[in-house]
Image: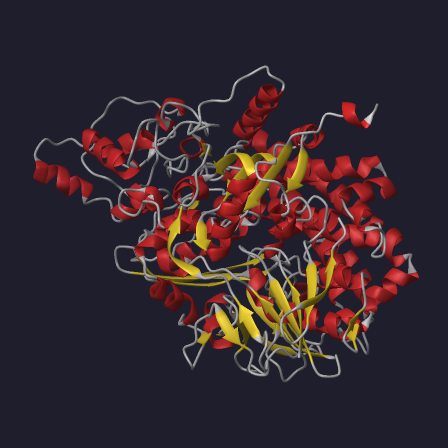
């Protein structure tokens, strides 16, 4: 038996490692995608005051602390069965929309964009944000910097800090914003809408105008027919901040739609001895291992999961972009929506959400009540148990807390965005490996970048390295013989 | 220009051990100054910003990295290996951010055993784990035959340790994360020192932070008012936006916490959480905070003081939220 080891892939609060096993004929038999770290938040949050959970759990991730802060805020509200004043909810969603905008921008331009905008087979040294600047123009680099900056300014204005915001508490927010701040946010929001439209135009001209790229997006290498999950509003439209969780099957049929608190009926998490991360799957379908199809409980979250699960977008320009996405990739048949299974289409779906987030910033900042002073109410109910769910950029994020009667945490359960995609990511790695490794030979050097591309689509949060300046993931593939002696090493050129 | 006249640029590295990545984001948030860093330094290792392989670091000469910012705690055998490796390769090793300096919030894991930490995840509600498996440092593939048919995972350590509990550290830069303005100042100082225009502080210093407390930076009014009880935000209908939060009964960690952030949290209506670590000269953060709290309570009888302090529902979390791993409770160099 031959081992192919990829180590380190990059981090998931640690880093990822891939083991690929070849059979006697040199064909891929299994792949193992290992996550080598655990930090133990579910345990050490026990005993802490419930009102501290938005602050404590923010430290799960410094790239998407806003997602944990807001999921936690919703969970602590639920623990107290308290409804924040409308202005507080507006502020939370406004901060969150600005965050989604900044995060999606970073992912598209810095991490994944170079593969398309510069080209998957361009020299690695050019496949980075600077290569994008060279190809598309210096102006784009300045725009990306400004987009990130504007997003983070809104986060700091509402959240108190740029990294690890702190203002969401049980029953609302610790502070509001002024009328002047509201006006500044509104102006930024309008700039953001223009930037998002520019980004979709760029996708149109640079990717859809190139047959090779379109073929790559549609190709089998990155296509899996799985279930899809995303939060939808009361009208079935995609919502990042609040709503019910909807799950659809590979054929687009409804598997279920439920209030977030019902997640234990729907989700189970498989534990394996060779990795620190659990594999969530659909409980009612069952765990069949790392395979796709309607009989396997593997589901996909993130931009592709959300756009497939939803009936449409809640803002007008994003709805137009949504309709174009499906008309190109999977036109409806007999009026029935079809699923897009191509994982690389995730990048396009992310841009549709980018526009939606920008439009939402404008809508929320237009509402005069967002500058109200009334941003918090004191809970009156005894604390017990609560669930908070939000759509993190990387997928459905659920925090579930239990407390004693003093409001001290007694139990915590977390299902994190990237974790939901653990099984689909493993599928994508295996698919890439199977299509690229034959007869014991590694097709190189394309293998490295093609495996990277399988990862990048998901924007996994071990790709905190995702938010990399160069867009390169550290990859090294070692092929070993049966005794473990390396016979060939391929490195990512840098 | 001949090759011999080219002055080699100083080498910069940044690494994240067991961390959330927020320290790296804070460095990226220095915006245009990052271009200056890129111009002045040869960035040789920085996983968030560039391709990075451990073997590349292993191949470097000892002491060849001029400045290494090391974030994250030491949670497993891989973190520890990289701490030793980067110590050997770096002239100046900075414990960067709260995790590396004092363990940060993940250091609260030191209140629990490894079995308890594993159970909370692998026996969680919803876990599908009928065989009660836990991740194994070495796991033999069912169809792996002999030879190298074993998958490896880093070994989870019994305690989360700070960087200086594992290797010698030259400087400590606190904060969760360090504020970007402080990061800019430190980089300016390092660049000036490289030009011979400034001197670096003595080894062992805290850098990128102030010498006083968070209270000294806080815009809120203090009236040296004594308090009769501590309250939680869930019990307080109105928080006066101008007055000291501690004087309003909210347990604010400002009096024990080092200055440097600009009192961001109290300015946003929330108590200081203590992320900048102990104020200058303080050995044990929690002990200092306890005495600070005791000094503001309106009581002289020990029993009465105790009753008021009982109003803090989670003393270990309140007093050691960021510093448990470094504290006298759970500290010390592990061999």
- Residue A301 in the image, given as x and y percentages of width and height: 62, 65
- What residue is drawn where x is 91% and y is 58%? A210
A268 left or right of B119 in image: right
Q: Is residue A24 above or below residue B56?
A: below
Q: Residue furthest top?
A: B197
Foreground of the two, A180 or B15:
B15
Is residue A206 visible in this depiction of the protein? yes
- Residue A438 in the image, given as x and y percentages of width and height: 79, 76
In which quadrant will I find the N terminus of chain B? Answer: top right
Is residue A360 visible in this depiction of the protein? no
- What residue is drawn where x is 33% and y is 58%? A46
- Residue B100 in the image, given as x and y percentages of width and height: 45, 42
Q: Is residue B10 above or below residue A346?
A: above
- Residue B28 in the image, given as x and y percentages of width and height: 62, 38
Foreground of the two, A480 or B37:
A480
Foreground of the two, B292 or B171:
B171
Count the labels in the image.
0
B75 left or right of A422 in image: left
* Displayed quadrant of residue B63: top right
């Amino acid at each position: 038996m031959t081992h192919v080891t990829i180590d380190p892939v990059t981090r998931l609060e640690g880093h990822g490692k891939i083991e690929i096993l070849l059979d006697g004929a040199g064909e891929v038999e299994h792949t193992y995608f290992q996550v080598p770290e655990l930090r133990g938040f579910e345990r050490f949050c026990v005993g802490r005051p419930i009102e501290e959970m938005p602050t404590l759990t923010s430290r799960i991730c410094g790239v998407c602390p806003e997602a944990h802060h807001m999921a936690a805020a919703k969970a602590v509200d639920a623990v107290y069965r308290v409804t924040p004043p409308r202005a507080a909810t507006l502020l939370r969603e406004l901060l969150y929309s600005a965050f989604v905008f900044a995060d999606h921008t970073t992912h598209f331009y810095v991490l994944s964009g170079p593969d398309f905008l510069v080209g998957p087979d361009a020299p690695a040294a050019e496949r980075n944000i600077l290569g994008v600047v060279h190809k598309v123009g210096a102006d784009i680099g300045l725009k990306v910097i400004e987009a990130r900056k504007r997003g983070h300014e809104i986060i700091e204005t509402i959240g108190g800090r740029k990294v690890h915001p702190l203002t969401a508490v049980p029953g609302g927010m610790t502070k509001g914003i002024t009328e002047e701040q509201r006006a500044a946010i509104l102006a930024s929001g309008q700039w953001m809408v223009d930037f998002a439209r520019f980004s979709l135009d760029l996708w149109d001209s640079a990717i859809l105008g190139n047959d090779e790229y379109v073929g790559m997006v549609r190709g089998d290498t990155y296509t899996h027919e799985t279930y899809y999950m995303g939060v939808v509003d009361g009208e079935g439209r995609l919502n990042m901040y609040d709503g019910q969780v909807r799950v659809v099957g590979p054929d687009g049929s409804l598997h279920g739609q439920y209030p977030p608190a019902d997640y234990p009926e729907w989700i189970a998490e498989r534990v394996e001895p060779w990795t620190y991360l659990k594999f969530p799957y659909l409980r009612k379908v069952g765990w069949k291992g790392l395979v796709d199809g309607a009989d396997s409980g593997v589901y996909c979250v993130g931009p592709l999961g959300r756009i497939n699960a939803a009936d449409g977008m809640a803002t007008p320009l994003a709805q137009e972009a949504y309709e174009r996405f499906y008309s190109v990739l999977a036109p409806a048949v007999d009026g029935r929506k079809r699923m897009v299974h191509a994982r690389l289409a995730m990048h396009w779906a992310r841009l549709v959400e980018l526009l939606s987030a920008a439009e939402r910033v404008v809508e929320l900042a237009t509402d005069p009540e967002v500058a109200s002073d009334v941003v918090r109410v004191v809970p009156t109910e005894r604390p017990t148990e609560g669930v908070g769910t939000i759509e993190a950029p990387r997928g459905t994020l659920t925090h579930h807390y239990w407390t004693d009667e003093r409001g001290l945490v007694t139990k915590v359960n977390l299902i994190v965005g990237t974790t939901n995609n653990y099984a689909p990511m493993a599928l994508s790695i295996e698919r890439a490996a199977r299509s690229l490794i034959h007869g014991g030979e590694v097709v190189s050097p394309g293998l490295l970048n093609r495996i990277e591309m399988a990862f990048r689509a998901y924007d996994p949060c071990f790709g905190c390295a995702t938010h990399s300046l160069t867009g390169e993931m550290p990859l090294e593939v070692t092929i070993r013989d049966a005794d473990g002696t390396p016979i060939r090493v391929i490195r990512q050129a840098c | 220009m001949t090759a011999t006249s080219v002055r080699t640029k100083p080498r910069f590295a940044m690494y994240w051990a067991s961390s959330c990545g927020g320290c790296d984001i804070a460095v990226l948030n220095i915006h245009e100054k990052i271009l200056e860093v890129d111009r002045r330094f040869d960035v040789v290792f920085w996983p968030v910003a560039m391709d990075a392989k451990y073997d590349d670091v292993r191949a470097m000469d000892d002491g060849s990295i001029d400045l290494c910012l090391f974030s994250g705690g030491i949670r497993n055998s891989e973190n520890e290996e990289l701490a030793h490796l980067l110590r050997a390769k770096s002239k100046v090793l900075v414990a960067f951010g709260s995790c590396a300096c004092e363990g940060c919030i993940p250091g609260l894991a030191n209140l629990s055993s490894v079995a308890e930490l594993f159970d909370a995840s692998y026996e969680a509600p919803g876990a599908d784990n009928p065989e009660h498996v836990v991740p194994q440092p070495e796991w033999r593939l069912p169809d792996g035959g002999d030879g190298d048919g074993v998958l490896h995972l880093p070994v989870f350590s019994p305690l989360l340790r700070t960087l200086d509990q594992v290797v010698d550290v030259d400087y400590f830069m606190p904060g969760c994360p360090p504020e970007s303005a402080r990061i800019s100042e430190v980089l300016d100082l390092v660049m000036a020192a490289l030009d011979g225009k400034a001197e670096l502080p003595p080894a062992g210093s805290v850098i990128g932070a102030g010498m006083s407390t968070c209270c000294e930076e806080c815009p809120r009014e203090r009236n040296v008012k004594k308090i009769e009880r501590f309250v939680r935000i869930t019990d307080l209908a109105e928080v006066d936006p101008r007055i000291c939060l501690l004087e309003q009964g909210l347990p604010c960690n400002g009096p024990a916490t080092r200055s440097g952030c600009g009192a961001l949290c109290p300015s946003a209506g929330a108590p200081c959480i203590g992320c900048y670590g102990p104020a200058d000269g303080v050995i044990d953060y929690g002990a200092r905070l306890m005495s600070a709290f005791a000094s503001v309570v309106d009581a002289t009888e020990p029993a009465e003081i105790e009753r008021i302090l009982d109003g803090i529902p989670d003393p270990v979390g309140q007093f050691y939220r960021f510093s448990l791993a470094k504290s006298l409770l759970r500290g010390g160099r592990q061999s």
